[in-house]
Amino acid sequence: MVTYCLGISCVCPLRWGLYFERFLNVQRGDCPDIDIDICGARRDELLDYVYARWGAEHVAMIASFITMHARLAVREIAKVFGVPPGEVNHFTKRLPHRPVREILDAIKNLPECRSLPIHDEPWKTILQVALRLDDAPRHLGIHPCGTVIFRAPVDASGAAGTRRQGHRRHAIRYERDRSPRPDQDGFAGAARTHHDVAGAGQH
């Protein structure tokens, strides 16, 4: 509705029944942002324009934290225990994509998991150790959409950042209560604007 009133979009959401209640949810602590959906095949062209327009030292991608889930935690611990890759794959491919803390309940309740040798070693110990890795960070990734444009160079903005090896683009990370969005605390004074540049697939 905001984009329609500002003339950014010519589509009236009320006329066409495009509901937007999720943006007005009282549980949402931040203001809604505007996502830009473009053809996925040309997303890099838009990012190249953003970097050229505002300068590579003033633009950064948002880093994401890849955390441990059930399959990944069990797989990593099994490697440490020296379990052969084939046996690891056979065990973990039957696990659901759930948080590590739910793994034991899932094994008890899901038919495809009930025959897993969870009471035999080394799997009994592997599962016990894996439970300690619930939601633990494994590595940094790059958010598929989040892009931040800074007034000052990224290195001087105070953002905890890194530059991927062999990559010209910065990646920044921040605490949840220090969002780079202009309407929130943290980087509000440093960030000019935050955009989600989403690449939509072609069908």
Image (cartoon, rainbow, N blue to C red):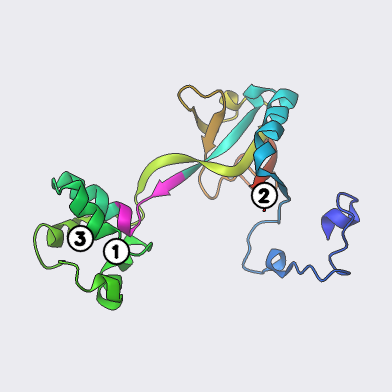
Query: Farthest front residue?
Result: 203
Identify residue type, mark 3. Answer: Leu
Residue beneath the point at 20% across and 60% down:
127
Q: How crowded is mark 1: few (under 14 residues within 10 Å), some or many (20 or more)?
A: some
Residue tagged 3: 127
- The amino acid beneath tag 2 is Gln
- Which mark is on residue 94? 1
Secondary element under disc 1, as helix, strand or loop, is loop
SS category of the residue bearing label 3: helix
Magenta segment boundaries in residue numbering: 65-72
Q: If the image is split into quadrants, where does the N terminus sit?
A: bottom right
Q: Nearer the viewer, residue 72 or 60?
A: 72
- Front label number (1 vs 3): 1
Give the x, y percent position of residue 140.
Answer: 43, 39
Residue placed under numbered mark 2 in the picture? 202
* Of callouts 1 and 3, the N-terminal one: 1
Work out how far the residue at label 1 is from the one at label 3, CA to CA, in angstroms: 14 Å
- Determine whether the residue tagged by mark 2 lies in a helix, strand or loop: loop
Residue 173: x and y, percent? Answer: 51, 39
Q: Examine the structure image and report whether residue 2 is included in the region drawn in magenta.
A: no
Q: Which amino acid does label 1 sit on?
A: Arg
Quadrant in the picture for residue 99? bottom left
Q: Which residue lies furthest to the left in this view?
A: 121
Q: Residue 6 at what x, y percent from top left?
A: 89, 51
